[in-house]
């Protein structure tokens, strides 16, 4: 099975693996690309507008790059801690539950965090300190947080170690990448999915109450439920493919 492809736009030729497919003046057959991805899963690709690159050079770029074990997070994380205060705008607010009640001090590790996650926490009255992905555990504990959030982010969760140092020392929760990191820190394993989950309207069943929740997802890795140790249970399941969508310990 091939694990790479390349298209050179505005160049002399567009290639898939080592087979010429299209000249620059031709239309790209997106249905052919879709069929290929449907059979082989996610493929490493190269998009280029550099006419000086040969097909073989572009193919070599795709062959030699791999997402597994690569630290992409450091390039998207903040460089220093900061306080987040913005709440969800009134036009988008959908609940007042939890407002004007007890305030929780939350430290959010930024692995590429979505600002709307921070807005939702602020809307519930949380005091939020956002810290870089490599922020030392000792510094986090000095803040005396009521909880630590491990955020969403790109890449392979195996490239991050900080979660193991904080687990069991303070209440923790994670979203997307953070969820996968918690699975590893609790003794489980993650694996690269064939297609990943991307886009909106992913149905997820909450196994504790039986409700189906609609979610937006964008990730290529998942926690292997078969590898979770005793004391860690799957709490949510993706109904499209049965993969683990949440866990508790």
Image (cartoon, rainbow, N blue to C red):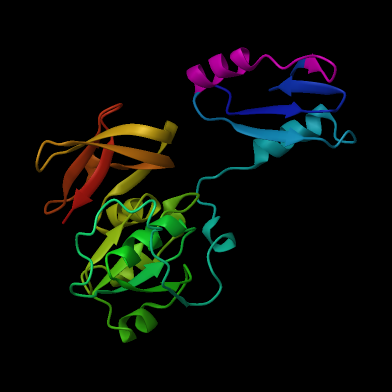
Q: Which residues are magenta?
A: 22-40
152 w.r.t. 50: above or below: below
* Residue 219 in which image quadrant: top left
Horizontal side of residue 42 vs 231, given as left or right: right
x, y percentage for residue 100?
A: 22, 72
120 w.r.t. 85: above or below: above
Q: Residue at x 42, y 56 (%)?
A: 116
Question: Between 28 and 87, which is closer to the camera in this rendering?
Answer: 87
Q: Residue at x 83, y 21 (%)?
A: 13
Give the tally of numbered discs: 0
The quarter of the image holding the C terminus is bottom left
x, y percentage for residue 95?
A: 25, 54
Q: Residue at x 31, y 47 (%)?
A: 189
* Residue 88 in which image quadrant: bottom left
The quarter of the image holding the N terminus is top right
Question: Between 89 and 233, which is closer to the camera in this rendering?
Answer: 89
Q: Is residue 6 magenta?
A: no
């Amino acid at each position: 099975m091939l694990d790479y492809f390349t298209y050179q736009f505005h160049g002399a030729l567009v290639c898939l693996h080592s087979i010429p497919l299209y000249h620059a003046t031709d239309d790209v057959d997106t249905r052919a690309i879709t069929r290929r991805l449907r059979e082989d899963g996610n493929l490493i690709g190269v998009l280029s507008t550099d006419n000086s690159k040969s097909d073989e050079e572009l193919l070599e770029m795709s062959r030699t790059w791999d997402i597994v074990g690569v630290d992409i997070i450091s390039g998207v994380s903040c460089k220093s801690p900061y306080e987040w205060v913005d709440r969800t705008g009134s036009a988008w607010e959908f609940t007042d539950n939890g407002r004007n009640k007890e305030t929780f001090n939350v430290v959010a590790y930024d692995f590429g965090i979505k600002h709307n996650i921070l807005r939702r926490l602020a809307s519930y009255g949380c005091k939020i300190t956002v810290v870089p992905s490599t922020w030392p555990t000792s510094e986090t504990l000095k803040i005396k947080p009521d909880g630590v959030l491990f955020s969403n982010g790109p890449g392979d969760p195996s490239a991050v170690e900080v979660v193991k140092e904080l687990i069991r020392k303070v209440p923790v929760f994670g979203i997307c990448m953070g969820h996968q990191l918690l699975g590893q820190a609790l003794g489980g394993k993650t694996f690269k999915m064939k297609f990943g989950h991307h886009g909106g309207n992913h149905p997820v069943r909450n196994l504790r109450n039986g409700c189906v929740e609609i979610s937006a997802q964008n990730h290529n890795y998942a926690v292997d439920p078969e590898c979770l140790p005793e004391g860690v249970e799957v709490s949510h399941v993706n109904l499209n493919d049965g993969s683990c969508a949440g866990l508790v310990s």
